Amino acid sequence: MNATALMFGAFAILVGIYPLLTRKNLMDNGERADAVVVRSERRKAGVGKKVFTLFNYEADGVLHEVEYQTGTSRFKYNDGETVRIVYHKDDPRKITIENDRSTVLLSVTFILIGAVTVLSGLGIL
């Protein structure tokens, strides 16, 4: 048994599960709104570049402007495009894009890497 592999694998699984649970909670309990893309830009974030999109939307009669990471390399949305979002009732600045599956795919990747690493650490693989 390899304790380092077990710890790394468990950590990767947790890193994968947390965004899934956060997104599911927001999708189940959040409010929906149509947001307009103000602009998207690619800029340095951490070790690489990421795409951030600025959205305007109305929640409870108040106009909100929220920046959201929408990718790592390509622009997904055009300026002026309308996108369906889900926002947190108590904090309208917390949003997710209703049909965006990129978070899900990345989370599943971390979970799979973690599972393989745990199984390898246990000597099963």
Image: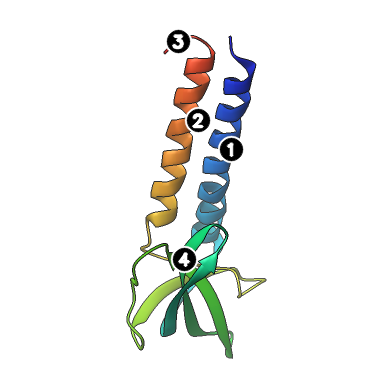
Distance (Cα) linking label 1 and label 3: 21 Å
Q: CA distance from mark 4 to mark 3?
A: 37 Å
Query: Dot 2 lies on which element?
Result: helix
> Given the image, on which type of amino acid does mark 1 rest?
Leu
Q: Residue at x 38, y 62 (%)?
A: 100
Of the two numbered discs 1 and 3 on the same chain, state the one appearing first in sequence.
1
Q: Residue at x 52, y 42 (%)?
A: 16
Packing grade of label 4 (10 A; few <14, some 14-19, many >=20) is: some
Q: Residue 21 in the image: x percent, y percent?
A: 55, 48
Q: Secondary structure at mark 1?
A: helix
Question: Mark 1 highlights which residue?
Answer: 14
Please, what secondary structure does the residue beneath circle 3 have?
Answer: loop
Graded by Cα atoms within 10 Å as few (under 14), some (14 to 19) or many (20 or more), the crowding at tag 1 reads: some
Mark 2 or mark 4: name the one nearer the start of the chain: 4
Return the residue nearer the eye: 74 or 56. Answer: 74
Label 4 belongs to which residue?
A: 50
Q: Which residue is mark 3?
A: 124
Q: CA distance from mark 1 to mark 2?
A: 8 Å
Q: Are marks 1 and 2 in contact (CB under 8 Å)?
A: yes
Circle number at residue 114: 2
Nearer the camera: disc 2 or disc 4: 4
The kind of residue tagged 3 is Ile
